[in-house]
Image (spheres, rainbow, N blue to C red):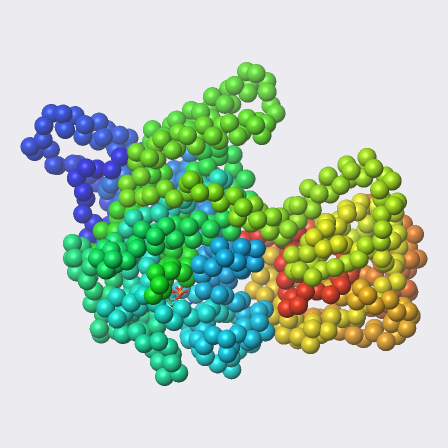
Amino acid sequence: MKQEKELIFNGEFEDSEEEDDDQSQDQESDEELNKKKKKKSLQNTNKNLIMNVSDTQYPVVKFVGKMIYKFKLQYVPYQEVNNWDFCWTDNAVLPETLAKMQSHQKINHFPGMYSLARKNHLGKNLNKMQKQFPDDYDFYPRTWMLPSEYNDFKQQFGKAKTFILKPEASCQGKGIFLTRSIESVNPTEHYVAQRYIHKPLLIDGLKFDLRMYVLICGCDPLRIYLYKEGLARFATQAYIVPNTNNLDDVCMHLTNYAINKDNPNFIFNSDEKKMDVGHKRSMSSVFQLLRDQNQNVDQLLEDIKDLIIKTFCSVQPILQQHYTQVDNYANNMCFEILGFDILIDSSLKPYLLEVNHTPSFTTDTPLDQYIKKNLIADTITLMNINLKTKNEVILQKKDEMQRRVLTGKKTKLSNEEKKQIKLQCQRQRDEYESQNKGNYDLIYPCSKTYEEYLQHSLKLYEEWTGANIRRNQKKESVQLSQEPQIKSQSQPKKIILERKSTLYKHVQSRINTNLFPTSKNEQNKGDEIIQEGEEQPPNQIDTIPEADNDNFFPYEDYQQQSLESIKDLCSYTEKRGRELQILDLIQYRKADNRLNNSHIQQQNVQSILSPLSSIKGVLQGIAIKNVKQFAIRKNNKNVKSSSKQMNESEHDKQQENSSKNQIIPSQQIYSQGNAQGMNGAYLKPKVFSLKLSHPPKGYKLQSLPLLIQQNYTKFRYE
Ligand code: ADP
């Protein structure tokens, strides 16, 4: 589809309604002319295709769309109209946008990509994978999320000398600093902290990093291409291993173009044919230089491809989850060019520094113009965006509808049928893309299997969202109905929550099983035990449970850090108040401490209440809009039973009655009611008590409301 004669982009582009006639027909043979005519007629039909560019600032995008592909550019905000065929935006895309799209439309982002593109999310996702695969996920500098991992981070000083701290959602080197002393780190500030790679590979004595362009053009299954060309960005001051005197030399330690271009030493590229000089060069010229030095560039490239795929594996379920809202068997409505920033150390090991979901398409040098224009053009070709394909997709949909009407088959396709259609679409894509990939290299699917990473990532995601618990609930309820004797014989279990994941699982199971588990299931609750790694059996939502005689203690670590944690939680909720509907008070139970309940009541009322009081105190100070209530309820023996459908007043009455026996005085109980969130999400706030034994070391309170938030809000996005 691309024109044979290359159109030169000079960095600027003003859209105009004029026709762009090809005037280069002079001395060409008949055959060539015929070929061209055919192409031209295709391009002319593309004039009926609408490319929405309302939300992009980059002239190069408009140039490629209009001049190379002959699309009609549209400037009405893409969220307000839905007649575009292809949309290019510089910002993240919301799940609602995808939900509204038809199968022939395409957009240049995946909802949910924040899970890679924000430094803190990337760090968290990779850290989770690293726990399971320490040797395989060692391709990024060791990372800590502050302030939640402050204590562990603090322990590192002395082991390593230099750390780099980055604001969690910044770019272009803004707010980044190097440090060798923990005193310079504010323990309450949000940062992503990393080990500083102190021995980078140098060229001409300068540190550099690579901006590699990666195209993800399918998430279910993953489909990933790596562009063969990219940029190498150089620091402008000769590199010296960090010492206390040079930590502030940003032009030595940071390779950001935004920082270094203002240094008078900076040499700008001025000719696209000389891509191997200056402080911004082509990636291929750097690889050539390394090859000339007998470095093993092929191995380096293999390592880079491997780290890219593993990075995507860590978030694939998140992307897929958003994608399930569209019936797109071809897996091709979204695509995204991501900028992977890679630092190479002196032993030629690549490190992933960050993933940019909106890499800059600024074209202020001939080098940028050349690379970025071709990158965008190759992407559009690869995504097969043209009128012919659009019409085929529409026709296919029509056929499908007709078939359904004729056969009267209203039911959805079976999983097997879907699988077959998907495979068929995939084969067609393989065939087309292998002929039209331009300067792209398909890196996934590939011969090597990444299944274990994908499986683990799915497991983590399901633990986080509770999907596994819902599935297990189903399974277990079937099992329970088949084997009733197993339940009666079951031994008392003991809560062991040594790992964060188990803790989440436990909390999640409580949230999912709701607040009023059956008294049947609750009879042995006081002795309830969850074995490490074992799922919590499901409870039906029937009645209010009987009380148990648990002893409640605040968790010592938690208490020590309560102020910090609560403040952190509050600032978090303040930022995301729009989404947050309910906060939870966690009561920690010492499982092995079986003291007399009344004795404990007297001794510990204050300490039990302290977290709630603190949260309330802080919240009153900062007036979070959307936090509806805080609820706490202690299971109560006096309450015999209550149906799941009981109305609010009945429930309130029951709470009132039950409060006499509660460890928590009644004035601390906040009644519940239905709430309509600002985002339109409807929820029924729920009251529950959680009894957790020892949370894992380093566990912080602020992690839990996240789970609750995920469960209680309809929309969740950033
Ligand atoms: P930003 O998004 O603000 O550009 P980056 O994470 O890309 O933040 O970091 C900016 C620059 O800092 C990088 O281009 C690199 O030169 C340097 N840098 C970042 N992390 C490290 C690290 N762990 N070790 C060494 N240098 C780093």
Kindly identify the residue that appears in the image at 88 percent across and 62 percent down. Answer: 549
Kindly identify the residue that appears in the image at 32 percent across and 48 percent down. Answer: 227
In this image, 55 relative to 272: left or right? right
In this image, 341 relative to 117: left or right? left
Kindly identify the residue that appears in the image at 55 percent across and 76 percent down. Answer: 154
The quarter of the picture where residue 506 lies is bottom right
Of all residues, the one furthest to the bottom in this rendering is: 245
The residue nearer to you, when weighing 316 against 43, is 316
In this image, 572 relative to 54: left or right? right
Answer above or below: position of 154 versus 377.
below
The quarter of the picture where residue 37 lies is top left
Q: Position of residue 490 (x, y in %)?
A: 85, 47
The residue nearer to you, when weighing 306 against 638, is 306
Answer above or below: position of 320 versus 26.
below
Q: How many marks?
A: 0
Q: Position of residue 174 (x, y in %)?
A: 40, 70
Q: Position of residue 621 (x, y in %)?
A: 65, 74
Answer above or below: position of 143 versus 312.
below
Of all residues, the one furthest to the top in this rendering is: 406
Of all residues, the one furthest to the left in this rendering is: 27
The residue nearer to you, when weighing 225 against 137, is 137
Quadrant of the displayed image that contains ligand 1: bottom left
Image quadrant in which the N terminus is located: top left
The quarter of the picture where residue 236 lies is bottom left
Q: Is residue 81 visible?
A: no
Kindly identify the residue that appears in the image at 38 percent across and 81 percent down. Answer: 243
Q: Position of residue 194 (x, y in %)?
A: 47, 68
Q: Is residue 235 visible?
A: yes
